[in-house]
């Protein structure tokens, strides 16, 4: 039986070419300030009331660097950062399998609709598959209709909903 990840990998590998000259580059601590500017744009798109608090600026990247199986990378096209992706690998909480998690995927507005996100995902799916990941999870804000459409087109299934309570 072919897995969904395998099917998706084959689909993306068969893209005619990687015409976007795309690479994923680790974001370094020394790039914190330029990254924070890009992250602000991303979070403002998700929530127009978003503003950068001191603890966000100080801790966002550091919290990722502390996890050996969490990664944050610039999406570089033609030597220019045009977005970022944050993803990781975790053990399933009760099954003995590894689960991939795509936490954030951001591409600047002017670079969207060019299949860049699909190319980024092809690279990530390959890395996750090499790490023996069996499932990939994402979370989408409930009002982000474009993201829901995108992820469903990729092959993700809507299987759960997350509720949150502020204390």
Image: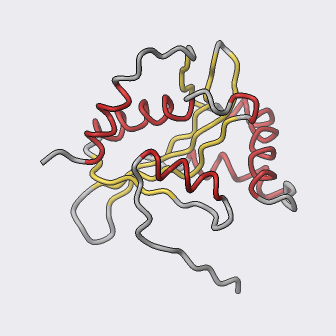
The residue lying toward the viewer, choosing from 22 and 61, is 22
Q: Is residue 158 left or right of residue 167?
A: left
Residue 19, position as x, y percentages in the image: 53, 14
Q: Residue at x 57, y 25 (%)?
A: 25
Q: Is residue 149 left or right of residue 11?
A: right
Q: Is residue 95 left or right of residue 30?
A: left
The residue lying toward the viewer, choosing from 67 and 73, is 73
Count of numbered marks? 0
Quadrant in the rendering for residue 13: top left
Q: Is residue 90 left or right of residue 152?
A: left
Residue 24, position as x, y percentages in the image: 54, 26
The way the protein has been coloured in the rendering is secondary structure
Residue 89, position as x, y percentages in the image: 40, 50
Q: Residue at x 78, y 51 (%)?
A: 45
Residue situated furthest left in the rendering: 1
Q: Residue at x 79, y 60 (%)?
A: 47
Q: From the image, which quarter does the C terminus lie in?
A: bottom right
* 161 shown above or below 39: below
Residue 66, position as x, y percentages in the image: 54, 49
């Amino acid at each position: 039986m072919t897995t969904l990840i395998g099917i998706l990998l084959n689909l993306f590998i068969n893209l005619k070419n990687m015409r976007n000259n795309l690479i994923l580059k680790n974001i370094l601590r020394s790039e914190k300030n330029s990254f924070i500017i890009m992250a602000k744009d991303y979070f403002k798109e998700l929530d127009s009331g978003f503003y950068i608090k001191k603890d966000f600026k100080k801790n966002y990247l550091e919290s990722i660097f502390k996890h050996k199986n969490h990664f944050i990378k610039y999406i570089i096209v033609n030597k220019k950062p045009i977005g970022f992706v944050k993803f990781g690998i975790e053990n399933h909480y009760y099954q003995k399998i590894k689960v991939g998690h795509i936490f954030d995927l951001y591409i600047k507005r002017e670079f969207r609709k060019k299949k860049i996100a699909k190319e980024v995902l092809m690279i990530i799916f390959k890395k996750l598959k090499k790490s023996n990941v069996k499932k990939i999870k994402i979370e989408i804000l409930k009002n982000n209709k474009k993201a829901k459409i995108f992820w469903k087109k990729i092959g993700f299934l809507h299987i759960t909903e997350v509720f949150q309570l502020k204390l």
